[in-house]
Image (cartoon, rainbow, N blue to C red):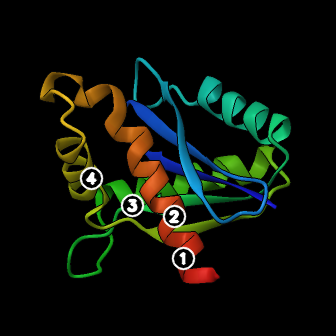
Amino acid sequence: MRLMGLDFGAHTVGVAISDATGTIATAREIIRRERESALRETVRRIESLAREEEIGRIVLGLPLHMDGSMSERAEKTIRFREMLEKRLTVPIEMQDERLTSVEAEEILRMRSIPKKEWKEEIDSLAAEIILQDYINSHG
């Protein structure tokens, strides 16, 4: 079963998709929007990708504070999940995403990607890390 990982941000959603066996996550794309509240096209794109890729489960990163408490972004992410659940029939699970951006930055640094190009890759790479963490923790 293919899985989709999402990193929900204020103006972007990073997307990663697993291989057909659901064991390896790969960064796919970044869905951008002008305004934080302009989510209709974002939801449509996710719905389209889920259908095209025959996604069996979506894993949405949950940005908790380091102490595990809910952040404002986590509350917005939960509302985004509710929007997705109204449009999609695919189950959506939340995955703790603490430190994924730091890990993504370290990977980009190790790949010697210039810092000015990080913005183009960091969100989809964070989605890849979220999805791979989910895969690793769920066998």
Q: Secondary structure at mark 4?
A: helix
Q: Which residue matches tag 1?
A: 136
Say which mark, if any, is on residue 132: 2
- The residue at the point 55 percent across, 58 percent down is 60
Foreground label between 3 and 4 = 4
Q: What is the three-letter code of the residue carrying label 4?
A: Ser
The one of 31 and 79 positioned closer to us in this rendering:
31
Q: Dot 3, crowdedness within 10 Å: few (<14), some or many (≥20)? A: some
* Marked residue nearer the N-terminal end (1 or 4): 4
- Real-space Cα separation, disc 3 to disc 4, in angstroms: 15 Å
Q: What is the three-letter code of the residue carrying label 1?
A: Asn
Q: Secondary structure at mark 3?
A: helix
**Which percent across, then down, holds residue 12?**
42, 32
- The residue at the point 77 percent across, 42 percent down is 50
Foreground label between 3 and 1 = 1
**Which percent across, then down, holds residue 1?**
82, 61
- Real-space Cα separation, disc 2 to disc 4, in angstroms: 14 Å
Foreground label between 1 and 4 = 1
- Real-space Cα separation, disc 1 to disc 4, in angstroms: 18 Å
Q: Secondary structure at mark 1?
A: helix
